[in-house]
């Protein structure tokens, strides 16, 4: 069995060194071969130098992709890999020592096409009390569910692109990662739809996926993500991405829409107004932040709808 890992990176030389070190230290089970492809997406730091230090004796390959955007980097790595299975890890993550062993076990013991797992946070500082627990995923902490299960319509989540392994034959069937700028993450945007877009295509193609709580990555979460400025930008971009995913039919909107936005979303936003106003008196709380983010995501959706109608 051959499993290659693709690591897209942009200006995170110090962190990608930790990613590669974790890949190097992880246990490679008998019967598994692996190579690592680091795809530099226009970094201006010393990423190339750092990556090349890992090249020998470990099989690490440095690739350069000049087109900005995570999906472009991923697709460059896919073109270079010739393995039967392809893993995807982000440049601010470290894999668990048993990551390869867990992937090998799942694919040799089960008839599946893709595999995913959780992101355990490495907080630079403790998360603020005002950050709602159900919003931790916005900053990169995704630890639920805690039990294994099959991906599909009833799964509470989706396949996350920073911790995934997909059968190459399945990738050839569904095609490359989406490079629509409204959906794809790039250096100058917090768009976040390429994972969801790929996941929905996998399901529509009939691919069989499984979530394993033992396929673990550890995600570095810097302090700048634990600010309202970052979280507002992130949820606005999420609203834009979700609108275009719905508009293209990749993830159809549930129920009737108004201005291209599900009508229930307006009601949900209105219910949060008292909590937002209460912030003036009682200060910021998890409840008021959750209500505010609902409005900001709605603004992102409406902005995308207006942009779409002009074009």
Image (spheres, rainbow, N blue to C red):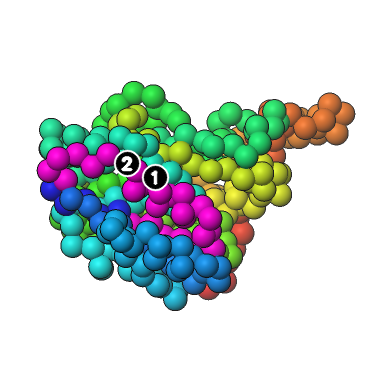
User: Do the residues under discs 1 and 2 have CB atoms within 8 angstroms?
Assistant: yes
The residue drawn where x is 82% and y is 30% is 283
Q: Which residue is mark 2?
A: 26
Specify the label residue 13 is tagged with.
none
**Is residue 194 inside the magenta stretch?**
no
Point out residue 148 in the picture as x, y percentages from the top left corner: 30, 26
- Name the residue nearer the viewer: 127 or 26: 26
Point out residue 164 in the picture as x, y percentages from the top left corner: 32, 45
Taking the image as drawn, is residue 146 in sight?
Answer: yes
Point out residue 287 in the picture as x, y percentages from the top left corner: 68, 28
The residue drawn where x is 13% and y is 37% is 108
> For the residue labelled by badge 1, is the local secondary structure a helix, a strand or a loop?
helix
Taking the image as drawn, is residue 37 in sight?
Answer: no
- For residue 145, above or below residue 153: above
Q: Is residue 46 left or right of residue 7?
A: right
Where on the picture, by quarter, is residue 157?
top left
């Amino acid at each position: 069995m051959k499993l290659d890992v693709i690591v897209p990176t942009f200006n995170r030389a110090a962190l990608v060194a930790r990613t590669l070190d974790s890949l190097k230290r992880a246990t490679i089970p008998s019967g598994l071969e692996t190579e690592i492809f680091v795809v530099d997406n226009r970094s201006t730091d010393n990423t190339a130098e750092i990556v090349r230090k890992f090249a020998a004796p470990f099989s690490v390959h440095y690739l350069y992709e000049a087109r900005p955007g995570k999906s472009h980097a991923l697709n460059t790595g896919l073109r270079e890999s010739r393995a039967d299975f392809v893993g995807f890890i982000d440049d601010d993550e470290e894999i668990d020592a048993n990551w390869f062993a867990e992937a090998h076990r799942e694919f040799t013991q089960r008839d599946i096409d893709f595999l995913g797992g959780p992101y355990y946070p490495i907080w630079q500082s403790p998360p603020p009390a005002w950050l709602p627990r159900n919003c931790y995923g916005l900053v990169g902490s995704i630890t639920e569910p805690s039990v294994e299960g099959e991906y599909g319509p009833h799964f509470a989540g989706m396949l996350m692109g920073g911790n995934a392994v997909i059968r190459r034959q399945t990738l050839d069937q569904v095609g490359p990662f989406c490079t629509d700028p409204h959906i794809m993450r790039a250096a100058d945007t917090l768009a976040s739809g390429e994972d969801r877009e790929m996941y929905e295509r996998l399901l529509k193609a009939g691919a069989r996926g499984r979530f394993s709580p033992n396929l673990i990555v550890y995600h570095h979460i810097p302090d700048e993500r634990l600010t309202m400025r970052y979280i507002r930008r992130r949820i606005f971009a999420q609203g834009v991405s979700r609108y275009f995913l719905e508009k293209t039919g990749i993830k159809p909107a549930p129920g009737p829409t108004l201005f291209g936005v599900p009508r229930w979303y307006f009601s949900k936003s209105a219910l949060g107004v008292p909590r937002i106003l209460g912030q003036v008196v009682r200060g910021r709380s998890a409840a008021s932040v959750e209500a505010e983010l609902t409005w900001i995501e709605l603004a992102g959706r409406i902005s995308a709808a207006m942009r779409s109608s002009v074009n």
